[in-house]
Image (tube, grey):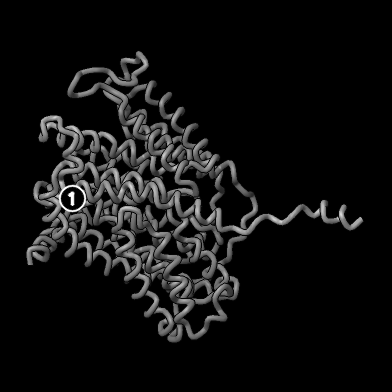
Amino acid sequence: MDALTSLFAGFETALHPMNLLYALIGVTLGTLVGVLPGIGPALTVALLLPVTAKLPPVSAFIMFAGIYYGGMFGGSTTSILLNTPGESASIITALEGNKMARRGRAAAALATAAIGSFIAGTIGTMLLTFFAPAIANIAVQIPPSAKFAMIMLAFVTISATFGNSPLRGLLSLFFGLSIGLIGTDLQSGQARFTLGFPELLDGIDFVTVVIGLFAIGETLYVASRYRKTQDVIKLEGGATMKRDDWRRSWGPWLRGTALGFPFGALPAGGAEIPTFLSYTLEKRLSKHPEEFGKGAIEGVAGPEAANNASAAGVLVPLLTLGLPTSATAAILLAAFQQYGLQPGPLLFMTNGDLVWGLIASLYIGNVMLLLLNLPLAGVWARLLLIPRPYLYAGILVFSTVGVYSLNNSVFDLVLLAIFGVIGYGMRRFDFPVTPAIIGVVLGPTAESFFRTALQQSNGDFSIFVRQPLTAFILFIVLLALVVPAILRLRARRAQPPIPPHTDAIMFDKE
């Protein structure tokens, strides 16, 4: 009942005309950037961080939430009509949805993706409404040493799951942690890693780091792989489904939602695993398995629902524990810190208006997105014809102006350029950027919890093994580091020996 009462109060906040306007701007921007290939919700939220610095926090986060959900909706249009998944979680949608579009069923593919996203997003938001306060009540009692251990778990699991190599993920994380250490130590007053530059004594603004690594680096990378000819499938009218499409879609929508939400709420769950699991499950349950790989509507409905349900699940650890489990969540955490707010269990008590206004806006934003995406699917599809060079140039100009407007500092622009080149290099050589951003944002928080735990134990390091919850979480961290390496080693030893070289066999025959 408390959750329902708080939710109704949140609707009062979200239904304020000005907040409705920001929600509409957010979902429209989110759909726009979701449709445009190479630009995701994380990049858009990062770009808007300097612009929204002067807005009231509630309005800013309602707009960010609209961008987040809108990006999920819009990404399916690119995957289906252009066969270009904007994110790894949209690969399955591109695989089956584009095949449907090539068979003349683009409208049905877009409709099942949009309606599935609406259903999954709404159910996921309902689960968030009732689970988040319960978890926050429990999290209040967690000691600082256990909170430090939980951040360590998030560091390790996110570094291991983002990208193709756990080692590259950990190196990216350590790079982010190093950036987070730059500045004056608030306890000792000592300057750390400032290299003699007085501008670095206050540390590096995370907005500069986030925009440089994510916006500039990502834009340079996408632009370097620009293809002039793009095969966009034309769409006439809106997105619609026939009765048979509805019959084949409702089951995958619900099963995808059931898979997506819990995976999104896990520290390293993400959206990729549930979308692939949903696709495999639907292939086994379908009465038309022969259509999979050729354009099966179940192969679009289930994964799209899983993708959007995981987006709601991601907000559970972010709001209750302050732990981001995706790139967009990491940048949302940075946005909270921009307003001097720390997501976690106390956020529900100290800033209840903001949290419940944000959750209520998710319901409203879902309805707006359905109304925007079904009848206007043809309009969004035309955005795919915008020349990409104009788009990339606009992002670079917007990023530069946004960072300069923060402090009117040329030094910040130099840092932005440096981080932009580093971000491009990381994408070019397959180093995931997300662990670095999470290291920058969460590193100072981890240090604060570590020091508080030591102060409470009078400098006794054994607090990290004596406190049961802390010891249990750190044991899981150790397993997460060691077990995958052992499994890879065993798999390598189990491989059959490599056969002799072909040239040698031919030589023997001669």
Residue beneath disc 1: 469
Residue type (three-letter) at the residue carrying disc 1 = Leu
For the question of whether residue 430 can be seen, the reply is yes
Q: Quadrant of the N terminus?
A: bottom left
Residue drawn where x is 46% and y is 33% of the image? 420
Residue furthest out toward the front: 508
Judging from the image, what secondary structure is the residue with disc 1 in? Answer: helix
Residue 397 appears at what percent x and percent y? 45, 35
Residue drawn where x is 27% and y is 69% of the image? 123
Residue 208, quarter of picture: top left
In the image, 329 versus 472, the foreground residue is 472
Residue furthest out toward the top: 196
In the image, 438 versus 502, the foreground residue is 502
For the question of whether residue 375 can be seen, the reply is no
Residue 441 appears at what percent x and percent y? 30, 38
In the image, 442 versus 349, the foreground residue is 442
State whether residue 244 is above or below residue 319. below
Q: Quadrant of the C terminus?
A: bottom right
Residue 198 appears at what percent x and percent y? 31, 15
- Count the numbered circles shown: 1
State whether residue 484 is above or below residue 438. below
Residue 50, quarter of picture: top left
**Horizontal relation, residue 203 to residue 278: left or right:** left
Residue drawn where x is 14% and y is 50% of the image? 345
State whether residue 38 is above or below residue 261. above
Count residues near mark 1 (Cα–Cα under 10 Å), then give few for <14, some for 14-19, many for 20+: some
Residue 211 appears at what percent x and percent y? 39, 37
Residue drawn where x is 39% and y is 32% of the image? 401
Residue 437, quarter of picture: top left
